[in-house]
Amino acid sequence: MYVSMVRAKLHQARVTMADLEYEGSIGIDSDLLAEAGIFPYEKVLVVDIENANRFETYTIPQPAGSRAIQVNGAAARLVELGDRLIIMSFVYVDFPPPTDWEPRVLILNADNSIKTTLGEILQAPIKVKG
């Protein structure tokens, strides 16, 4: 049996652009993706702190250092520029999960720079469903 655990999270990421005409996804500064340990094209759950809207999509890298958080496609209707988002990636691990589980968390400033970093990027000594 497996359990789904939060692996990485960007907390209070601010929406810098929303493009209804783009074909889906959430664009994230590639530096933030790397620092969080989130892969390009990885599925993520996104929660808008301002209005409680939730949606799943996949990440696409934006230019390094741009601090861009761009919500695309139909999900662009669920956010406003400047909204704070929680962006989470998950992984399946053997049940019961490790007692010392700690996801990688980046808490961001209003300009999407990193304010605080918690946890380490989770590597694969943990057996994951593959």
Image (cartoon, rainbow, N blue to C red):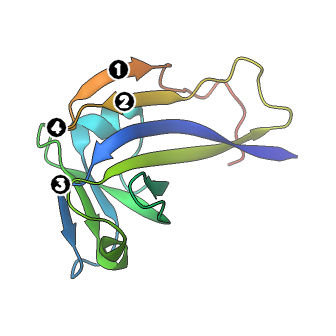
Q: Kindly give the residue lying farthest to the front in the view shown.
A: 50
Contact, mark 3 vs mark 2 (Cβ under 8 Å)? no
User: How many residues crowd around disc 2 within 10 Å: few (fewer than 14), some, or many (20 or more)?
Assistant: some
Which residue position holds label 3?
A: 16
Identify residue type, mark 1. Thr
Question: Is residue 13 at all visible to an observer of this figure?
Answer: yes
- Residue drawn at x 70%, y 39% as measured from the top left: 128
Q: Secondary structure at mark 4?
A: loop
Quarter where residue 95 is shown: top right
User: How many residues crowd around disc 4 within 10 Å: few (fewer than 14), some, or many (20 or more)?
Assistant: some
Alpha-carbon span between mark 3 and mark 4: 9 Å
9 lies left or right of 69:
right
Which residue position holds label 4?
A: 111
Identify residue type, mark 3. Thr
Alpha-carbon span between mark 3 and mark 1: 20 Å
Q: Earlier in the sequence, mark 3 or mark 2?
A: 3
Which residue position holds label 1?
A: 116
On residue 107, the disc is 2
Contact, mark 4 vs mark 2 (Cβ under 8 Å)? no
- Residue drawn at x 35%, y 40% as measured from the top left: 12
Contact, mark 2 vs mark 1 (Cβ under 8 Å)? yes
